[in-house]
Amino acid sequence: MQSTNPKHLRTHMKNYLDLAAQEPLRILRRTGEAYILVNEQQFARLQRELVAMQRRLIALDPRFDVAAEVDVKNMSQYF
C-alpha cells in the first residue's frame, strides 16, 4: 500500500485515483490522522465480506440460537 499526504494527493489526484483503482492508498495528515482511499468496487466487496463474517459470528453465538430455550425474565443480561 502506497502512502501520500493531502497536498501531494491534490496535486496528483488523477494519478492517485488510477493507483487506488489497483490497490488501497493511505493518506496521512500532519496531525497523524490516516485515511484509506479505495475504489467503490473494492469498498463494496469489503462491506459484503464484513457482513458475511458478522453473520457467521452471530450464527455461532448461542444467544441467537432460535432453537435454544430462552429465559425471557433474564433477557436483560444479553443487552
Image (cartoon, rainbow, N blue to C red):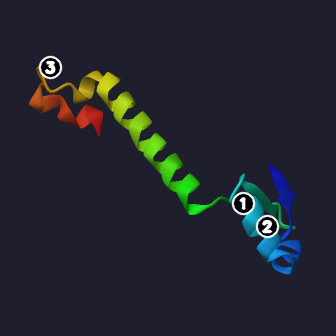
Residue 34 seen in the figure: no
Picture disc at residue 45: none
In the picture, measured across the screen, residue 24 lies left or right of residue 29, that is left
In the picture, measured across the screen, residue 72 lies left or right of residue 34, that is left
- Looking at numbered disc 2 in the image, what kind of residue is underneath it? Tyr
- Kindly identify the residue that appears in the image at 56 percent across and 62 percent down: 40
In the figure, residue 29 lies in which quadrant? bottom right
- Looking at numbered disc 3 in the image, what kind of residue is underneath it? Ala
Picture disc at residue 68: 3
- Looking at numbered disc 1 in the image, what kind of residue is underneath it? Ala
- Kindly identify the residue that appears in the image at 29 percent across and 40 percent down: 79
- Kindly identify the residue that appears in the image at 23 percent across and 37 percent down: 76
User: Dot 1 corresponds to which residue?
Assistant: 20
Residue 47's x, y, as percent?
Answer: 48, 50
Work out which residue is located at the far bottom of the displayed protein and give it.
11
In the figure, residue 35 lies in which quadrant? bottom right
User: Dot 2 corresponds to which residue?
Assistant: 16
